[in-house]
Image (cartoon, grey):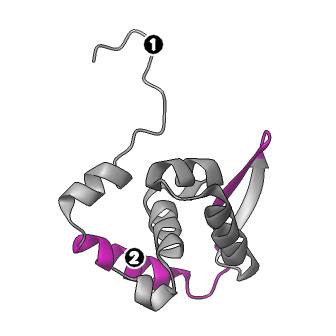
Amino acid sequence: MLEKLFGNVTLEKVLFYIYNYNEGYAQRISDTFGISLNMVQAQLMKLEAGGILASSLKGKTRMYQWNSRYPMLKELKSLLSRTMEYMPESEIKKYYRIRTRPRRKGKPI
């Protein structure tokens, strides 16, 4: 939806992923959308260099999350939120309702 505004589809998907889950790492984003890992890493580095995202290490994994110091963060999140309202429900279920934590041991399915 916003690929024309952002310049490419990969950047759009990375932003929507981070917006929905509040954090993410390159391999998970790549696996979720079926995009090349190199393309995702390039976009994450571009967003971090631009000050939109910040990263930190959790173990050996570099996690990316919103940079709270980015001056236009509120407006960017607002744009992403508004755009998600027009996204087809099938796409939302496929990409943005993925369980990210393991199920409690012994919990019935």
Above/below status of 77 relative to 32: below
Amino acid residing under circle 2: Leu
Inspect this view and state whether residue 100 appears: yes
Above/below status of 108 relative to 73: above
Count how many numbered circles sit on residues in the image. Answer: 2
Q: Residues within 10 Å of mark 1 (few under 14, many from 20)?
A: few
Residue carrying label 1: 105
Q: Position of residue 53 (x, y in %)?
A: 66, 71
Q: Position of residue 55 (x, y in %)?
A: 73, 61
Residue carrying label 2: 80
> What segment carries the magenta color?
58-86
| Viewer-side residue, 7 vs 55 | 7
Q: Position of residue 33 (x, y in %)?
A: 45, 55
* Label 1: which secondary element: loop
Q: Earlier in the sequence, mark 2 or mark 1?
A: 2
Q: Which quarter of the rendered picture does the C terminus lie within? A: top left
* Label 2: which secondary element: helix
Q: Residues within 10 Å of mark 2 (few under 14, many from 20)?
A: some
Amino acid residing under circle 1: Lys
